[in-house]
Image: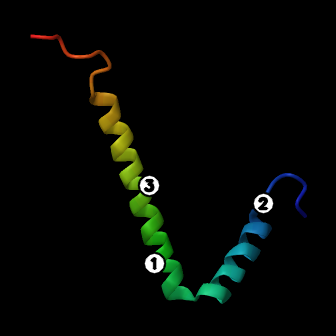
Amino acid sequence: MFGGKIGVPELLVILVIALIIFGPSKISELGKGLGEGIKNFKSAVKDGETTPTEPAEKK
């Protein structure tokens, strides 16, 4: 069953167990929080790419 890879049947079992433990409302809150976290991470990475890598010249 767990031969090094997680397949679709294993994911379904995990989702069903999570649904039983947390309930549908908590699962949606967790998904929303995860989505916001990923969005913030992507924006932080994008902001990091636009900042200069060399120090500014001294006046």
CA separation, marks 3 and 1?
14 Å
Secondary structure type for disc 3:
helix
**Residue at the spot x=50%, y=74% of the render?**
30
Q: Position of residue 57 (x, y in %)?
A: 17, 11
* Residue 20, above or below 10: below
Q: Earlier in the sequence, mark 3 or mark 1?
A: 1
Label 2 crowding class (10 Å Cα cut-off): few <14, some 14-19, many 20+? few
* Residue 18, above or below 37: below
Q: Position of residue 8 (x, y in %)?
A: 75, 64
Q: What amino acid type should be assigned to the residue bearing mark 1?
A: Glu
* Residue 33, above or below 26: above
Q: What amino acid type should be assigned to the residue bearing mark 2?
A: Gly
Q: Is residue 1 left or right of residue 37?
A: right
- Looking at the rendered image, the disc whose residue lies closer to the viewer, 2 or 1, is 1
Per the image, the residue denoted by label 1 is 29
Per the image, the residue denoted by label 2 is 7
Per the image, the residue denoted by label 3 is 38
Q: Is residue 14 left or right of residue 35?
A: right
Q: Residue furthest left?
A: 59
* Residue 51, above or below 18: above
